[in-house]
Amino acid sequence: MVRLVLVGPPGAGKGTQAAVLSEKLEVPHISTGDLFRANIGNSTPLGQKAKSYIDAGELVPDEITNQMVRERLAEPDAKKGFLLDGYPRNIAQADVLAGILSENDYELTAVLQFDVPEEELVRRMLERGRSDDNEDVIRRRLAVYHEETEPLLDYYRDLVVKIDAVGAVEEITARALEAVKSRS
Ligand code: ADP
């Protein structure tokens, strides 16, 4: 049973790796970015609230995000473990997650840190061309990562395993699986 948190800057390839790892480890992939995009696609009230923040490269307010994750983790499939991709993204969210985990008697297995040099991140995102991947928004998302998300690496210092996330997708998956093994 594994319970993982993936941390890394935008463009680090967390989503790609999370999809593969979730299959290999047989746990659900819970991506807040994907959940927001699905809500935006379906024009739900949650999607309407989240859209302007996402398009500006800002974090969606914590109340909205925390509630969405709390509901997702309450679904039955999360009982067999999970892989959180894009959450928590700041210390306040990490505190809420700690509460959810302790209410359920869950412990995190590891926090995987995806490490990629900044020039490579920008190059990848411009290539990907998602609607929030224009240059100004990318710059803002990177700044938000440094200001808000990077402090999580200290918060989770006892759980963090750093993964070199430059290379072929399969190579990085192998490194991530090795990291999980080292912690389980
Ligand atoms: P990336 O990792 O490339 O930034 P994501 O798909 O993880 O892409 O996130 C896209 C956007 O969704 C973020 O820029 C942010 O606006 C919003 N978002 C995702 N996760 C969170 C979160 N935990 N808290 C607040 N906003 C979030």
Image: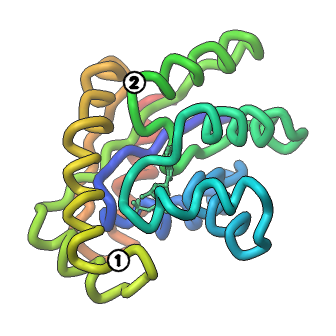
Q: Relative to 85, say whether 73 is above or below.
A: above
Q: Is mark 1 within 8 Å of ligand 1?
A: yes
> Could you tell me which quadrant the N terminus lies in?
top right
Report the disc number at residue 143. Answer: none
Q: Residue at x 19, y 60 (%)?
A: 116
Position in image of residue 9 (x %, y %): 29, 54
Amino acid residing under circle 1: Asp
20 left or right of 81? left
Picture quadrant of residue 171: bottom left
* Residue at disc 1, secondary structure: loop
Q: Residues within 10 Å of mark 1 (few under 14, many from 20)?
A: many
Q: Which residue is mark 1?
A: 133
Give the camera-side residue of 92 and 25. 92
* Residue at disc 2, secondary structure: helix
Position in image of residue 98 (x %, y %): 57, 17
Amino acid residing under circle 2: Ile
Q: Residue at x 60, y 45 (%)?
A: 83
Picture quadrant of residue 134: bottom left
Position in image of residue 108 (x %, y %): 55, 25
Pointer 1 or 2: first along the chain: 2
What whole-number distance in Å separates the C-alpha atoms at marks 1 and 2? 25 Å
Q: Residue furthest right?
A: 76
Q: Residues within 10 Å of mark 2 (few under 14, many from 20)?
A: some
Q: Relative to 153, say whether 31 is above or below.
A: below
Q: Residue at x 58, y 65 (%)?
A: 19
Q: Which residue is mark 2?
A: 91
Q: Relative to 100, say whether 173 is above or below.
A: below
Position in image of residue 140 (x %, y %): 24, 58
Picture quadrant of residue 170: bottom left
176 left or right of 1? left
